[in-house]
Image (cartoon, rainbow, N blue to C red):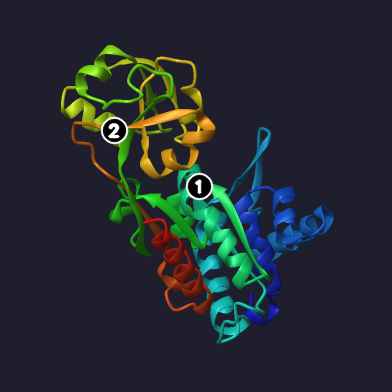
Amino acid sequence: MKLGQVDLNLLVVLDALLRERNVTRAAERLHMSQPATSTALARLRKTLDDPLLVRHGRELQLTPRAEALIVPVREVLATIEQTIVRPPRFDPANDVRTFSMIASDYAGMIVARPLLARIGALAPNLRLDFAALSVPFVQALERDEVDLAILPEQLADPGRLLNCSSMPVFVDRFVGAVWSGHPLASGQLTAEALARHPYLAYAPSGGVSLVEEDLDEAEIPRRVEATAGSFTTMPFLLAGTDLVTFIPERLGRQVAAAADIALLEVTFELRRVRQSAYWHSRRDSDLGHRWLRDQLAAVAGQQE
């Protein structure tokens, strides 16, 4: 097979199929019809002499050859996009472009909402596609499948993000939170008070929270009565209860009135929440991406 025999447009379809592992979702990503995407898959199978996607039960799985093509195909398309297709300048007032971002619901409340407002005013033709923070975020960053991911620093092990750049976005601290009618509402949260009241714990998927680690290390007892997997949900679970919990202060100040809660100063040491933005280093010199990072830094600074 010679390069001249390969339709390079098929690489775009191949990339979508490798990402989605599903013909229908790949078609939706490409804004193509499903029959057209299936036809392209058939051409790819013939060109590469490999089935690429094989059925396993109800799901489609990548063949070993397809798995081996994920990174090379992404790198080829990224090089074409950034050196040939994309113009050597960036005009936010007129350029049309979509940026994909990953962030937790908490980080989204703190910076994504003001970022949307800022970009809407400065760059009306730009689009931001937000996705929830999920387990494959490392893979998405390493494969350059997402423009930016805003992550807690403890999740971003440098050993897992070897090809990524980063910048700090914001730092927050934990405060206590109770219903406004709680006996502690006008006081402080001490270790003794925490032990006396039922406790709402933050239980992130696949890990332990900073707060729980710090409480365990300090041997501070608590009586867990409920858990939640989302910081933004927790303040709204407190009204009318005796529960005590910890939430990031910036989040608490934004939702205190709506959730009918009081924020409490904590009398013992808890580590701070540090959120940073990560992206594939290939995008370091991308003018549009650099502009997006500048806007993120600007709205994060306004939150100080």
The residue at the point 28 percent across, 33 percent down is: 211
Quick check: 51 above or below 266?
below
| Total numbered labels placed on residues in the image | 2
Q: Earlier in the sequence, mark 2 or mark 1?
A: 1
- Mark 1 is on which residue type? Met
Residue 195: give x, y in percent of width and height: 25, 15
Query: In which quarter of the view is residue 88 placed?
Result: bottom right
Q: Which residue is mark 1?
A: 109
The residue at the point 39 percent across, 18 percent down is: 182
Residue 211 is labelled as: 2
Q: Nearer the viewer, residue 75 or 222?
A: 222
**Which residue of the protein is positioned furthest toward the left in this rendering?**
218
Label 2, label 1: how far apart the Cα atoms are: 20 Å
**Which residue of the protein is positioned furthest toward the front in this rendering?**
186
Question: Relative to residue 216, is residue 113 drawn left or right?
Answer: right
Quick check: 11 above or below 226?
below
Mark 1 crowd level (few <14, some 14–19, many ≥20, 10 Å Cα)? some
